[in-house]
Amino acid sequence: MKDEQGKIFDQSNRPLRDLRISVTDRCNFRCRYCMPEEVFGPDYRFLPHTQLLSFEEIERLTRLFVELGVRKIRITGGEPLLRRDLPVLIRMLRSIEGVEDIAMTTNGSLLDKHAESLKEAGLDRLTVSLDSLDDERFGRMNGRGIKVATVLKGIEAAAKAGFSVKINMVVQKGVNDQDILPMASHFRGTGHIVRFIEFMDVGNSNGWKLEQVVPSKEVVRMINEEMPLEPVDPNYYGEVASRYRYQGTDEEIGLISSVTQAFCSTCTRARLSAEGELYTCLFASQAYDLRKPLRGGASDEEMLEIIQSIWNKRNDRYSEIRLQNTTGLKRNKVEMYHIGG
Ligand code: SAM
Ligand code: SF4
Ligand code: SF4
């Protein structure tokens, strides 16, 4: 399925519009919900550099994805800022005609050093993950005792460099739900939008249980009691976060309700792992190796055909199915650090 402009569609008529590119599988954090230390300890073998896609390979693939309809790019990881010379890649992607938006998700710990060069290279937007403003809880959650101030410094540097920053907070009942209100009030009025994310059953190692999810409705109720909220219309088709603003202001928060309100029907995202595997869903158990044909000398036309046939076959709707089977579905899933969320 392809329209006159060359855009491709999947089995549910969803176009391919977003590409999330993981540039490394390594991370300097060990968030318990993503890369628990007991699984990702000192002996864990991460990918050797030769297996990572080079910047040239990422650029070529991105150009091909754009030909098929992709308009928005998100750079992620692992921790993307561990990849050396990242601004060079941003500049390469920025020069691809048709790319409308380049964003990055980072844990913020190295942002202080890199914010300005990322801005100069043409990065449009930044999302910084921060789960608590309490050093002890945050240190425990990131598994490395990293201080809140380190991340706040990164956020400040990003704002100074001219970025609009979004803050991602993964909420886990009994772990950091007491931080919902402090996070909302800390960032209110700063221009940075906090987005509360429901803890998801990604991967196989985070021991997910439905009881640990704080439904977005509950988050809205809690904040609304202290600081009255009103809903805001979505910005565009397929927007993942539902938006609220503090009544009578333009200060917003966002809710990403991946568990309680699945948004598969408008999901237009493809994910490329650091070693060049294509995933058509965050919960996919199957990957498509694009590096092999890429390094095997496939022409652009051949690569386009491969990507198109993968997308045309796509029928993923994991979160919708999970809604009907809330114990978490048993299947062997890709890990979050591998494809970057
Ligand atoms: N290292 C970067 C960071 O943490 O921002 C980028 C990669 S990280 C995998 C991308 C996002 O996924 C982060 O905002 C993180 O909080 C979120 N994430 C990881 N595991 C998650 C889970 N089990 N449920 C919900 N969000 C999760
Ligand atoms: Fe690293 Fe991000 Fe995963 Fe935390 S969520 S372990 S920072 S990749
Ligand atoms: Fe998209 Fe898969 Fe998430 Fe559904 S479960 S919104 S198809 S990534």
Image (cartoon, rainbow, N blue to C red):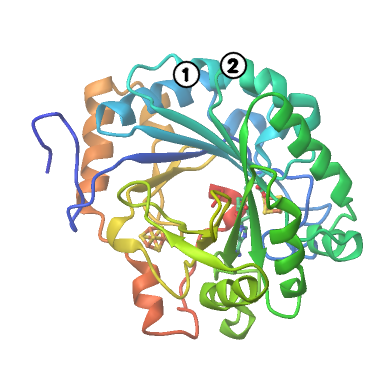
**Circle 2 sits on which residue?**
121
Q: Residue at x 18, y 56 (%)?
A: 11
Q: Earlier in the sequence, mark 1 or mark 2?
A: 1
Q: Reply above or below: 177 against 114.
A: below
> Do we see residue 296 in this rendering?
no
Disc 1 C-beta below 8 A from ligand 1 = no
The residue at the far front in this view is: 248
- Give residue 54's position: percent from left, percent from top: 55, 23
The amino acid type of the residue labelled 1 equals Arg
Comparing 275 with 238, the one in front is: 238
Identify the residue shown where x is 42% and y is 25%: 295
- Name the residue at 76% across, 55% down: 186
- The residue labelled by disc 1 is 94
Q: Quadrant of residue 84?
A: top right
Is 340 on the left or on the right of 299, as rendered? right
Q: Secondary structure at mark 2?
A: helix
- Residue 97: tell me if it is visible: yes
The answer to which of 15 and 27 lies nearer the viewer is 15
Query: Do the CB atoms of the residues marked 1 and 2 lie less than 8 Å apart?
Result: yes
Which residue lies most toward the left here? 4
Left-right relation of 97 to 104:
left
- Percent coordinates x, y for residue 19 in the rendering: 41, 39
Element type where label 1 sits in the image: helix
Q: Quadrant of residue 199?
A: bottom right
Q: Amino acid at mark 2?
A: Ala
Q: Is residue 241 above or below residue 17?
A: below
The x and y percentages for residue 60 are 40, 21
